[in-house]
Image (cartoon, rainbow, N blue to C red):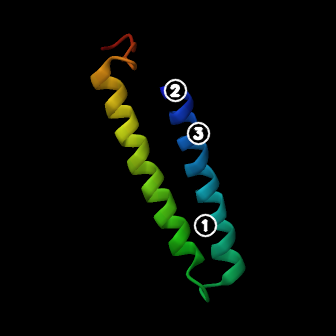
Amino acid sequence: MLKIIIGLLLAGILISLVCGFVFFFKDRGRSKRVLYALGVRITLAVLLLICVLYGFTTGQLSMQAPWM
């Protein structure tokens, strides 16, 4: 379940990034939609970080990299 939430948060960050890009070129600096997209992206990134930290502390996520 936690991995699904992390995947959805990553997808939300990418969607917000694309929306901010479109707003940047469409509005040409006349509105604050780019700033709102940035705020959404920062909020989603903080939630993603919290979910990942929660997953590591509870043991639901683990590092399986060969160099670790």
Q: CA distance from mark 2 to mark 3?
A: 9 Å
- In depth, the one of 60 and 33 nearer the eye is 60
Q: Amino acid at mark 3?
A: Leu
Give the label, 1 or 2, closer to the camera: 2
Q: Amino acid at mark 1?
A: Gly
The outermost residue toward the right is 26
Helix, strand or loop at label 2? It is helix
Question: In x, y percent, where is residue 15?
Answer: 64, 53
Q: Quadrant of the C terminus?
A: top left
The residue indicated by pointer 3 is: 8
| Up-down relation of residue 54 to residue 38 (above or below) | above
Give the label, 1 or 3, closer to the camera: 3
Q: CA distance from mark 1 to mark 2?
A: 26 Å
Helix, strand or loop at label 3? It is helix
40 vs 51, left or right, is right
N-terminal-most mark, 1 or 2: 2
The residue indicated by pointer 1 is: 20
N-terminal-most mark, 2 or 3: 2
| Up-down relation of residue 23 to residue 4 (above or below) | below
Q: CA distance from mark 1 to mark 3?
A: 18 Å
Q: Residue at x 43, y 42 (%)?
A: 48
The residue indicated by pointer 2 is: 3
Q: Quadrant of residue 27?
A: bottom right
Helix, strand or loop at label 1? It is helix
Q: Residue at x 43, y 49 (%)?
A: 45
N-terminal-most mark, 1 or 3: 3
Question: In x, y percent, where is residue 33?
Answer: 59, 76
18 vs 38, left or right, is right
Question: In x, y percent, where is residue 59?
Answer: 33, 17
Q: Residue at x 27, y 24 (%)?
A: 57
